[in-house]
Amino acid sequence: MRRLTVLLTFLTAIIMNLGVEAHGPNQKNKETASITSNRGPFELVTHTGKTVTDQDYLGKFMLVYFGYTHCPDVCPIDLQIVSEVVYMLGKDSAKVQPLFVTVDPARDTVKVMADYVKHFHPRLIGLTGTKKQIASAAEIYRMQSRKSVPQDAEPGEYLIDHSAAIVLIGPDGGGLSLFPHGIAAKDIAADIERFIKPR
Ligand code: NI
């Protein structure tokens, strides 16, 4: 029964997610994810300069968001929601690790990430890496991103259109839920609580 509930939650989340456009004209590759599609492995570098892999977070729920620090609007809103969720979980928040993975490793260095995550929950970990490491992590989580240059951009200036979904990974490393942009923090918190305290 529990397994069925998990599956239904995940499928519902996927369906909800498909109704939400990536933030920008990012239409390609809308394949349906399977229940295990979000399984690791990844290797990235934290905003304190430490190399980590998915193995480091086993045993915890991971709340993962892909974005970039120059993002004008969507990323700050979503990271604010992630932070709120962690606060809402109270004592249970110790079981949850919020992670922010950049899709813009060229600009989002360790130092830039360190300065940025300060604006959100104190336990939010910013993750960057080489272009290859980021691409590999994004592929695992099925997060799309694409550089876009506005017409009025200064030389060298660019934006990145990217999927804007928050992913919940279980303590065993398996994907549990995919929350679309615009979902309320309390709904994410309630979903996590259902996994933490199954009835
Ligand atoms: Ni963004």
Image (cartoon, rainbow, N blue to C red):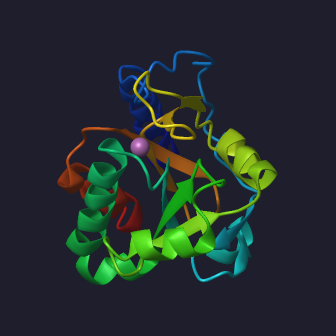
Quick check: can you spot residue 58?
Answer: no
The residue at 35%/67% (across/down) is: 197
Q: Quadrant of the N terminus?
A: top left
Q: Position of residue 33 (x, y in %)?
A: 60, 29
User: To which quarter of the image does residue 190 belong?
Assistant: bottom left
Residue in the foreground of this view, choosing between 15 and 99: 99
Ligand 1 image position (quadrant): top left
Residue 110 as seen in the image, left or right of residue 134: left
The image quadrant where one finds the C terminus is: bottom left
Q: Which residue occupies the foreground of this view, 132 or 147?
A: 147
Residue at 31% x, 63% y: name it.
193
Residue beneath the point at 48% across and 39% down: 4
Visible residue check, residue 93 = yes
Labels in figure, total: 0
State the residue at coordinates (43%, 40%): 165
3 with respect to 142 (left or right): left
Percent of width and height locating residue 12 = 39, 30
- Residue reaching furthest to the front: 155
143 is higher (above) or lower (below) than 26: below
User: Residue 162: x and y, percent?
Assistant: 50, 35
- Residue 23 picture quarter: top left
Residue 39 placed where, x, y %? 69, 50
- Nearest the viewer among 12 and 54 is 54
Is 169 placed above or below 154 here? below
Q: Does residue 119 appear left or right of residue 186 in this picture? A: right
